[in-house]
Amino acid sequence: MQRRQFIRTSAGAALAVPFITKGAKPKIKIGQIGSGHSHASGKLAAIRKLSDDFELIGVAQPREEAKSPIPGSGAYRGVKQMSEEQLLATPGLQAVAIETEVPHLVAAARRAVDAGLHIHHDKPGGTTLGGFRELLRLAERKGVTVQMGYMLRYNPAFQFMYRAVREGWLGEIMEVDAMMGKMGSASLRRELGRYDGGGMFELACHLIDSVVYMLGKPAEVHAFTRRTQDDGVADNQLAVLEYAKATATVRCNHRDSFGFPRRRFQIAGDRGVIEIRPLEPGDHVMLSLSTARGDFKRGTHKVGMTNRGGGRYDGEFADLARVIRGEAKLAWSYEHDLAVQETVLRAAGMPVT
């Protein structure tokens, strides 16, 4: 997606506020397929929290993970468990959150879309480009929505940044520098070892989504991978995204003892800079301007976010409810989602097939 399309499509929906308006609207019947994704319990908790909008039908494991038990504690406590077939056959079911293990995301999503259901598809878009493209084509034919689970889209600090770039506060964008890492546990390293692209594929895809949203699909992508331990996991990675006048660097380090507080996203133009650090909870940004813009004078400002509300994933499902009801359109097009998937694969050094 080119920057002019970003400007056009993000004018309203990109600043969606992550809360539900009270009212007597019919609840949307929704289920969840899978508990194996790293976000699965958090997404289920968000659905249950937004009870004014959603009626949770139950949770099922996908066919590929049918032998894996569904947890019975935390967000899963008291939730009805059923088979995938039972869930998809539920009368009046409108939507499904796809929260399987990453290799099974697209297959489970296809079955839900083929059943005529809207889906929330957690990140990334599977392990190939072709499979994800076919999913989106199927969704277009069926007339249903595929919402990708890139959580930073609804982070208040990122929404502020999108607006600033859209309105030209930073001038012509010259560079982006972004980092997302953590200290990988033994279990996480085993999970990352399933993908040749390691953490750049599984985690830093969140950052790449925002880079592509603001700058469009890069002309070239260069991947640099280091495997620092005997298990061969790609745990120290850098990707350089080239544009006509800009470059973006994205780092992912799974041997970082201070990964969460060091997570950052900085974007610089010839008239200003925004830095988000840490990325979450998104309660402030550092804004530097060479000329006054909006309510901000020339200089550097710590800008607190006033549109905070809800948990980490609430904004995604609040927006999905509006889209399903026809009250809004997603700010992220399928063209954009495909560009992100291709860029993620290239940045992670994975085959683009």
Image: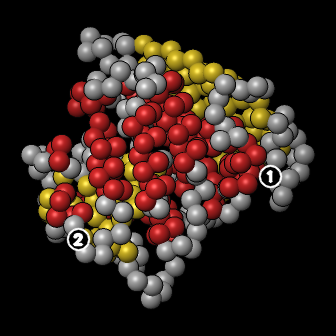
Quarter holding residue 139 = bottom left
Q: Is residue 193 left or right of residue 172?
A: left
Counting every numbered tag in the picture gives 2
Of labels 2 and 1, earlier in sequence is 2
Residue 162 in view (yes/no): yes
| Disc 2 to disc 1, C-alpha distance | 45 Å
Q: Is residue 74 left or right of residue 235?
A: left
The kind of secondary structure element at disc 1 is loop
Q: Amino acid at mark 1?
A: Glu
Q: Which mark is residue 167?
A: 1
Please tell me which residue lies in front, 264 or 196. Answer: 196
In this picture, is 169 found above or below 80? above
Return the x and y of residue 30 as percentages of the image width and height: 32, 68
Please tell me which residue lies in front, 339 or 312. Answer: 339
| Residue at numbered disc 2 | 90
Instruction: Tell me what residue is drawn at x 30 percent, y 44 percent.
Output: 107
Q: Is residue 121 left or right of residue 41?
A: right
Q: Which mark is residue 14?
A: none
In this picture, is 150 found above or below 347? below
Q: Is residue 188 left or right of residue 27?
A: left
Q: Nearer the viewer, mark 2 or mark 1?
A: 2
Return the x and y of residue 9 as percentages of the image width and height: 68, 55
